Each structure stands twice: as C-alpha cells, then as structure tokens.
Image: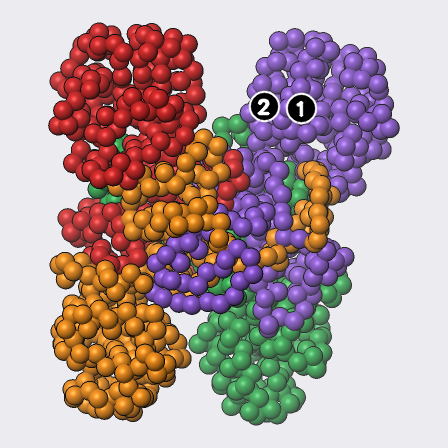
Chain colours: A orange, B red, C green, D purple
Amino acid sequence: MQLGLVGLGKMGFNMRERLRAAGHEVVGYDRNPEVSDSASLADLVDKLDAPRVVWVMVPAGDATLNTVADLAGLLAEGDLVIDGGNSRYTDDKTNSELLARTGVGYLDCGVSGGVWGRENGYGLMVGGDAEQVERAMPIFDALRPQGPREEGFAHAGKVGAGHYAKMVHNGIEYGLMQAYAEGYELLDAAAEVTDVPAVLKAWTRGTVVRSWLLDLLVKALDEDPGLAELSGYVEDSGEGRWTVEEAIRHSVPAPVISAALFARFASRQDDSPAMKAVSALRNQFGGHAVHKAGPTSGSGEVK
Amino acid sequence: MQLGLVGLGKMGFNMRERLRAAGHEVVGYDRNPEVSDSASLADLVDKLDAPRVVWVMVPAGDATLNTVADLAGLLAEGDLVIDGGNSRYTDDKTNSELLARTGVGYLDCGVSGGVWGRENGYGLMVGGDAEQVERAMPIFDALRPQGPREEGFAHAGKVGAGHYAKMVHNGIEYGLMQAYAEGYELLDAAAEVTDVPAVLKAWTRGTVVRSWLLDLLVKALDEDPGLAELSGYVEDSGEGRWTVEEAIRHSVPAPVISAALFARFASRQDDSPAMKAVSALRNQFGGHAVHKAGPTSGSGEVK
Amino acid sequence: MQLGLVGLGKMGFNMRERLRAAGHEVVGYDRNPEVSDSASLADLVDKLDAPRVVWVMVPAGDATLNTVADLAGLLAEGDLVIDGGNSRYTDDKTNSELLARTGVGYLDCGVSGGVWGRENGYGLMVGGDAEQVERAMPIFDALRPQGPREEGFAHAGKVGAGHYAKMVHNGIEYGLMQAYAEGYELLDAAAEVTDVPAVLKAWTRGTVVRSWLLDLLVKALDEDPGLAELSGYVEDSGEGRWTVEEAIRHSVPAPVISAALFARFASRQDDSPAMKAVSALRNQFGGHAVHKAGPTSGSGEVK
Amino acid sequence: MQLGLVGLGKMGFNMRERLRAAGHEVVGYDRNPEVSDSASLADLVDKLDAPRVVWVMVPAGDATLNTVADLAGLLAEGDLVIDGGNSRYTDDKTNSELLARTGVGYLDCGVSGGVWGRENGYGLMVGGDAEQVERAMPIFDALRPQGPREEGFAHAGKVGAGHYAKMVHNGIEYGLMQAYAEGYELLDAAAEVTDVPAVLKAWTRGTVVRSWLLDLLVKALDEDPGLAELSGYVEDSGEGRWTVEEAIRHSVPAPVISAALFARFASRQDDSPAMKAVSALRNQFGGHAVHKAGPTSGSGEVK
C-alpha cells in the first residue's frame, strides 16, 4: 500500500527501506533534501492518494507535536496519522483530539529494534481504534519481524497504549541492561574468573539469562576488549524517567527500574553534591580524613 | 566416555538422560533406589573403571561437602571429581584441597538451564586446570547446547571460577526477572493498556528486551491468565545473596541485583517490623491515622 | 497583629492556639461551625481590617486552589494570602498569579512539626517577596520555635520555594524513617540483641544517629512494646512522590528516598503482581515449587 | 576506679581525658610513646592492681584480635577485658572464648560519638554478662553523656550484642546521611530555592527532620560554603557492609542502607565497568552516540 513517511533519520530511513523491500510505496519527507522524496510536508500530502496514511517518525516532544499539528492543517477527513516516535503517551491524546476535529484518524505505535530493525524487523505496539489498526496492518506486517504476527505486533489498547507499552518496554530495558552491567563488573573484579568474555559468551545458549542484550554485550566485548574505548558516562532518553513517574502515579514499586535510572544519573556526575555532603558529615562527626577537591591522599577513622 | 553421577534429582536425572542419549555410559547413584544404578557411593566407585570421573549433582552446602569428602575416601590418584551443583565458590577450595591430598583432581562446573536443559542443553561454566577440563570435555560437549562450543561452555578460570560465574549468572537473573516483573505490574496497572499478554508476546521478536525469560513469562501468562493461581511469595536460593555479598566484598555497586533480592525478602513478609516502625513514627509526629493490626479503616493527614 | 486563618483542622487549630498565646488576634474560619470564628469565608474577610493577611491551612490540591480562588474574589489590593498547607510548589505559581491580578500578595510557607508544633513551635520555610515576608514576620516569629529566628525559619527564595523546601524536607523524612526502620528490623531479627528498646533508647544521647525521629521511635516502643498494635501498612501523602519526580526532573540520583517510597507502596500490597510474575518465571524455568494462591507448602530447587 | 586503656588514637585519647576528668585513674598504653603512660602492654598490666579492667581501643580486625590475644597471655583470672573498638560482632566470640580459658572476663562495647564524645559523652551499647557489666559501670557512667543512664547506655545482650548494636547504628547512619545528602543535592539543583543553607538551618528546630547530623551539615556548610573544598569521594569503614550482610543473613529487606552503601562505592569510581557496559549496549542496539574515553561530545537517539 501507499504510505507517507515523515522523518528519515536513523529509524525512518531504515523503515522506508524495509517497507519498500516489502513492496510498499513510500513517499518520504525529511528536512534533509538528500534523503527526502518530497519538497515539503504539503508536497508529501499532495503526492499521496486519498485516503492517506502518514507515518510520523520524528523526535518526541515538540517536533512530533508540531508535525502532527501541521498535518492536521493539510490532511482531510478519512486520512490517518500514525506516530511511530518515542512520544510520551500523554501526547497521544493531544494529537488524536486535534486530528479528530477534521475527521483524521490517529494511531500511536511504539517501535523497538534499533538499527537492527531494518534487517530483523521491529517489535510494534499499537494504540487506537481496531478499525484503523486493521487498515494499517499491511504496513505493520511489513515492519514487524517475520514469524507469527502476535510475536512482533500487538494492538495494546486505545490511543496512547502503544506508547505506554513502549515506555514500559524501555523501562524494563534499563533494568535488564543494569543487571547485566552489574554482573559484568563483578566478574571483572573477581580474581577467580580469568576469562570474562568467555563466560558471557557461554551464557548465550542454554542458560536462563540468554537474551538479545546479552548477545550484544558479547559482541561489544569482542569488538572492544575491556570496553577500553568507552567512558562510563551514560545518557538517558526519557522513557526510563517516564516509567518511574508512571510507577509513582500507580503506586507500583519500581526499585530496579529506578535504580537503573539513578545509576545513569550518577554516571554523569563528576563530583556529586550529595556525596560531598556525606563526606562533609563524616568529616564533621568523625574527623575522618576526607578527599579534598584536588589532589588527595590519606584516610583515617573515628567512630 | 564413562561417568559416575551422584544425585539423580530433577537436574541429575535429566542430565543422565541427555548424556546417555549422546552415547556416554553413565552410572548413577542416588539415595532413592528407584532411580539409582548403584547401591551405594562405594558401589558406584566400584562400577567405574579407573581413572574415574565422578560428577556430583546434589544440593549445595553440607550435602555436597559430605559427598566430596566421602568420595575422597573412595577414589584413587588420577580420578576426577566435578561438582556441578550450585555450590558457593568458596567451597571449591575446600573440596579441591581435600581431594588433592590423594591425587584426585577437581573441577567446579556451574550449570544453567533448569528443567529445559535435558532438551536444549545446559550452559556450562567450568573452573579448574585446563588439563582436567580437556579430559572431561566429551561430557561437557554432551551437556551443553548444540552449536559452537563457546556459546554454551566456558573455561572460566581456576578452581572456583565456574561456581563464581554461575553465582553471578543467577544474580543477573534476579535483576532481569525483577525488571520484567516491575514492567508487567505497571502495564497491569495502566488503564491505557487493555491487552497486557499481547504486549508481552509482541516483545518476543524484534525488540530490545526479547529474551528467554520473556518467552517464559509469555508462556506463564498463557497457561495461567492473570497469574491467578500464584501467590506473590517468592523464595530465593542462595546465589542472589552471595552475589550481593561478593559485590560488597569487591566494592561493586549492585543496586539492581540487591533491589531484586530485597523484593523477594519483602514478598515473604506479612507484616514487616520495619514498616510497622515507619507507621509508628508517622503516628507519633503526625497523628496520622495508621492501620492497626486487625481490621482497619480511615486516613488522616498532618504535616 | 491580626490574622485570618482558613482551616482549623489538626494543624490550623493548633496554630491558632499558638498564635493567640503569643498575643495575636486570629479570626478563624472552618466549615465546622464548632471551631469556626466566622460564618463564611466572606464573613472572615469582613471581620479583618485592611490590609488583611489571610493564612490558608487546608488540604493541598483542589481544596487549597479553590480557597485561594475564592479569596481572590473577596480580598482587595494590598491584602496578603499565605498558603501554609502541603501544596505542590507548582500550585504556588497558579495562586500567586491569580491573586496578583487584583494586587493581592502571596507567600507560600512550608510548615513542619506535626502535632507537636503547638508546644514546640513549627519549622517554617517561606517563598515570595522579601517585603511580604517582612510584613508577616510577627506571625512567623510566633509560629516558629523559640531560639534564633534562623534556626526555625528561612526565607527560602521566590514564590514556590517554601513548598519546594517542605517537599524536600518530607522526602528526606521518608529516607530517615526507613533507615531507622531497617535498623530496627535487623536488631529485632538478631538473636544477639536481647533488649532492642534499650538499644534504641541508648542512642538518644551522644550518638551520631540521635534525632527527634529516634526519640519518637523510642516513645512509640515504650507505648506499644513490639509495635504489636500496628500493622505494616504505610500510607504516603504526596511529598515523597513529588520529591522523586523532582529528582528525576533534575537528574539527581535519589536511591534512598525512592527506596523509602517504594517500601511504602509495597507495604500496601497483599499480593504483588510483580512478585507473582517472578514466581511464575521461577516455576517456568526451574520447576521450583511455588506458593500457590491459597494455603501453601513445600519448596524445591533446580538451577 | 582504675582502668587500663590500650590505644590512644583519636578515640582512646579523648576517652582517657573524659575518664580522668571524672576522677578515674587511667593507665594508657599506645605504640606512640609520646601519648603512652606505659612502656609496653606487659608494663601496662604490671601497673594495674588485680583484679584488672583493660579497655581495648584499637582498630578493628587483626589489631584488636592480636591485642586481646596478647592480653590473654598477660592477664589473670578475675581480670576483665572490654573491646570498645568497631570490631565485627563475630570477633567477640573469638575473644571471649580465648580469655575464658584463663578465667578472664570479656565485654564488647559499641561506642558512638566521634570527636565530640570527649565533651558530649559517648553513646554506649554493651554485650556480655550482667555481672561484668555492673562491675565496669563506673567507667560506662563516666563515658556516657550526662542525663539518665538509659539514654546513653544499654546492656544490649550477651557477648557480641554491643558490637552488633553499634554495627546497626552505623548502618542506620549511612542511610540517614544519604537521605540528607540527596535532599541537599535536590535543593541545590532547584532554581526555586535560592538560599539552601538557610533552609537547612531552618530545619534545625521544630521540624520532623531535626537531628544532630543535620546540625553538622549546617555547620559544614557554614564553614565551607557550597562544600567547595571537598570532593565527592566517600570512604566506608566496614559497619555499613556488615549491616547489609547481616540483613541478607536474616532476610531483612535493607533497600535504604544498601543504597547508601552502594552510593559510596560508586562515588569512588572514575569510570565504572558497569556503566561502560550499559554504554556499550546502547551503542550496539541503538547506534546511540556514546561518550568515548577521552574528550567527548554529541548525542543521538534511536529506539
């Protein structure tokens, strides 16, 4: 079928390739003319036959909200917009209500798979009306991995459910990554274990902890032994934060996901005000030798 | 090759089947005569041709230590004992030193795979001398999953390294399970997501969080929708505790693995003394209405 | 000086007493006529001489927002409203902007001290313009504990700063309470320590952990040995959640405060969906005996 | 009464001063002849009248164990040794059993108060036989703060109970410090609050979070505004680790105390292997721009 695709960055570009390989007609638009198939959003809309389906694949937040608002002014009754970005699920209500005013449908779709999705397919979680989901199914079927549909695609619920599921997916991802990372650091610290990469590789078949993330960790250690080329500074991109906020909203204990998030925050701090305060307290009550800002040495103990 | 196998419980029994299917001669011993191939440990040793290889697959702790001590009195120079149980890595030193007095070799082998190992093969992590590892390789090759050896087997280091790696494996496992569990609870709590099992199933291909544990969660929800037949009381079996203790010993931050462990502890408490203390404090300073032991009601607020 | 006081619940009632004892003229209003000095909010405003100062002490959220909105319609240029409730700091902007339209000033004041404040005085943190703070200083001086002003009162910053400081105060409080509670539970579990209340009491002078909260825990154990009359079900009232949300917003690691918050969430769950999921996973991969919903028994182990 | 005191470091020196000020006769021994009252441990024992009481105040672990072993060879039936150091409670069994062979009594005494103890007195928690405790009471009474005995002294239980209680005291201390520290960092990060030291100072009277540690934090910020002279590198000295290990042994959830401990571990890491692993994973699946070892820049996002 025919699809308009707004946003041809790392994700959108690859998705266009996968969709075309599956025989779909994709008209892309990106601000970068080198990758764009159309001159403007208006041009994109012109190039599509009504009723149109337009997939938005731009950064979450204002970029997505503005793109949807622009589309609301260009599309017509019976058209459909799908937001495949990492939007916060609360934005979906805004988008769907805006589009509904002119009879344009809306689906939100959480997309997982990263740069590997072009080849392996993307895991998809969709929110919105069943009728609209059915209409876009050929697109979902082309994007999702081969195999049974339900193993790479879900109609998760009403509008917002797709991004909600993707948010939780990423929250879990934070926890999984941190669990492997803590184990890796411990293996690395233990004198007993002399071949850490071999141990991780031996876990990739048969064990309880086998997973795609483990495969990637093995691959990373193979490409960069000791991870010598990386620093321990880790960004976070929103969904982890939102997941903890939602956990709070629903009174759901989330000690693991929040610990993973806070570990990232801490990884980005050179000199934490909190730990300076702890240091100050130890100094105050114990006369503990503390590390001064700048070159340091020494240690002492009083209880 | 020929192997003595002590302990034919859920794990040992299945391993005997897998080894025999691979053409090895296994003489098993278990206290339960219905599954045992020999009348006693001494009888088992008698039935084996020297130099013997005896695999111990009994509960960690005293049972394993006593079995190895008994074997030390029965085996002869040139024989080899492999402890495949979930022993603490510090026990391996005890065992190997005891056996070394009479020239008996020792390997420790962490085994992962659970009840699925008989069919899928077991992930194996081994500690000890390379020569002994090589000697037992036909057994390891039969037990590990099919595929490249290094994807289901590692010679992790010296004596103790196998169990150390298995310990960390299980610590990671705690973290992974808790991460999925928190995500599951949050999806369950969110009104937006109306088909939680479908979302989890859609994650099994293509997504970043795909894993064997996720497959099992999907299976569990399929067999017992809403997990209605289970309570939230979760045991732990040692390795999670040891992992945190090792993290402390090596000054490795382990917020996720420890949070997963503590969540299990908390799951087994009906009425936590700690939370009663928090409740008492709130009552003291705020005149907060608190939940009394027994039927409760009401709520209040003072700051 | 003269003060209008809206809300005569546990906090407001005590504050009126303390203010009157200090010689101030307080005209109170409460929906409960038994404690109210005026028949309505309008009546309260009528009873005050311009320029008026009205202190709002009602539940945070809609009750406070609505009260301020009502006051906005009743007060006149030059009047001043002080919100002493546990409002979220973001509400202060709403309130101050609304009142500013008619030239009414606004201060937000975090108040700590609980039911003990009437006797001991209240710790006060205030946000707003210095001029307005100065104007209300006689009230603040009467409410705060005796001693140097700066040890019980702070002008924390602009509008919102008072409630922000109070929010963080309460977040810290969550962490402190949980720290004592964990220690209490551990002492309680240890066979070595046979007189837990005596230990806690011995900490109240001279030690590093001495504090008012510790005094209260000692008092609680004195009044209810073993805390036998309490359940471990612990409510939370908002500020702990907001603190973690603010920590996330500012990328500040808050492992302790969040752990304390999540411990409360968990204390309120009979059967946690997350722990049921962990239980289901253990059952799937290990054939672990799991606790079924309903009467349970048994245990098993497979790795 | 007469007391031998071994170890005249920061703690022992101050305790000798306090004991002498209370009229007791203290014969001290330290390897440093400048502060020592005796030439050797044997000389110390010679200088005391039987039955002797010797207080050991040296670093925990080997130093204490060796000192007690040396005393076992020098003391006689009816003498008493008190270990006032920060020993692990498990060492007390070793010490008491060794001394019991020659009829020498043993008490373990947890001591809290730091460098302020000389002036304020020390909080004391004692383990051992009631008879021996009674015998040493004049010493305990001189060391503890003025006021009711039970507010600065406890006979916590049998041998080991004193150090157990001190261990838990310090575990709680870790949690308290981290709670204040997180709150401090959040206040510091918030644009709303413009006078953080004033807020902390305003909490020192009347509020729920008032404590001695808070007083010290106020003092630290007063002496070193912004804590500019300190780094965020924080040592730990054993009891925090032991507390978490004991929590694990007793299946007591300790999320706050462990989080505080791990925050210290993390504060000492420049480049965490765990966070490098997380970074590597993000890079693998997302093509996320990651921070390389060395000068870095940029950011990207793929999901």
Q: Residue A137: image x %, image y %? A: 15, 72
Type of amino acid at the residue the image marks with label 1: Thr
Q: Mark 1 lies on which chain?
A: D
Q: Mark 1 points at which residue?
A: D64
View extreme (front): residue: A34
The one of A145 and C288 positioned closer to us in this rendering: A145
The one of B299 and D164 positioned closer to us in this rendering: D164
Q: Which chain carries label 2?
A: D
Q: Residue at x 43, y 33 (%)?
A: A193
Q: Name the residue under label 2.
A: D91
Please identify the quadrant where the N terminus of chain D is shown.
Answer: top right
| Residue C246 visible in image | no
Label 1 crowding class (10 Å Cα cut-off): few <14, some 14-19, many 20+? many
Q: Residue D232: image x %, image y %? A: 63, 52
Q: Residue A109: image x %, image y %? A: 26, 71
Question: In this rendering, is residue C164 above or below D285?
Answer: below
Image-based side of C245 in relation to C209, left or right: left
Type of amino acid at the residue the image marks with label 2: Asp
| Residue A126 visible in image | yes
Numbered mark located on residue D216 in the image:
none
The reply to whether dot 2 and dot 1 touch (C-beta < 8 Å) is yes
Question: In this rendering, is residue A66 above or below B167?
Answer: below
Q: Residue at x 16, y 36 (%)?
A: B119
